[in-house]
Amino acid sequence: MSFNILETKIRMALDKWSNDEPIEYKEEWIEEAGEQFKDALRKQLKPREKQFRMRMSNIGRPLCQLQMEKMGEERSRNSYNSIIRFLLGDATEVLVEFVLKVAGVNVTGGKSEAKLSVNGTTILGENDVEIDNKIYDTKSSSPWAYEHKWGDGWQGVAKDDPFGYINQLYGYSEGTGLEPGGWIVVNKSTGELRVVDAEFTTDDKDKIRTDVSNTVEKLMSDAPFERCFEPQDEYFQRKLTGSKRLPMNCTFCPYLNKCWPDAVYKPQTGSKAVSPRHFWYSEYAGDK
């Protein structure tokens, strides 16, 4: 099933449902969705695993972040609303699977264990859903990322992938022997949905294999810590602001304050907007 057909089928089913038109469903699908969300609640109620291990969900994360985690460094405290975001992600996954069934999509599997051996280390994971025997990952997205990242398709993901979604999908594919399909992305603010096709080339796969192999080797050998990113000169209206902004990867890292103890979260330097975007800065030349 191609990208266009899959997305169209899903949207057509949602359009009918949104307009009170009859849709075919099985009661067992509702029961399955209910049990899946119960499992998600139980999972989120359990304390997170403390012992470090390589997982499909982290094989694309920066080496420095993984080294911090393996060394047992203290993470930044999550905001009070973090659990709601986690649960929204779980709920989105459950809802998408239900909608796929209602839409008559050929769901050929899902929740399959993926197992990958890299340099003697076994990496495990569980995929989201299989459509026409291809692996698809379900993602809930902020409005900004939905438009500016996922909206640019494969190139948008490849250009800005701080969470390692591409490596994760590659791992699921290699670990199950199934082809990568892509991502089903839901805008968690508007409910809009799009399907982003995976477009791995042979060179892409070779590079990912090399990157993952190098990461595993350095982690398992307890190689010296490597900070992978440095602050970047900030430009506003094509002019240098004098501030130095931390890269996006650092922004999402739970060890940001360990690497950058003097970092500050401030409005964009020079912006006169009523509600300016905020960024993390190692050096800030704006109004204090």
Image (tube, rainbow, N blue to C red):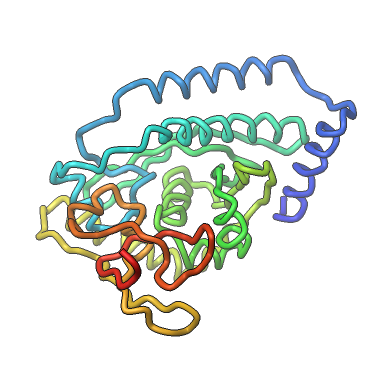
Q: Position of residue 53 (x, y in %)?
A: 24, 40
Question: Which of the 4 image quarters holds residue 241?
Answer: bottom left
Q: From the viewer's perspective, is residue 269 above or below residue 175?
A: below
Q: From the viewer's perspective, is residue 127 above or below residue 49?
A: below
Q: Position of residue 75 (x, y in %)?
A: 23, 42
| Residue 249 vs residue 129, the one in the foreground | 249
Left or right: 43 with respect to 112? Answer: left
Direction right: furthest residue: 21
The residue under the point 45% across, 34% down is: 86
Left or right: 20 with respect to 269? Answer: right
The residue under the point 11% across, 53% down is: 222
The residue under the point 54% across, 52% down is: 180
The residue under the point 36% across, 52% down is: 252
Q: Position of residue 179 (x, y in %)?
A: 55, 51
Q: From the viewer's perspective, is residue 262 above or below residue 135?
A: below
| Residue 132 vs residue 166, the one in the foreground | 166
Question: Which of the 4 image quarters holds residue 149?
Answer: bottom right
Left or right: 94 with respect to 158? Answer: right
Label total for image:
0
Quadrant of image for the C terminus:
bottom left
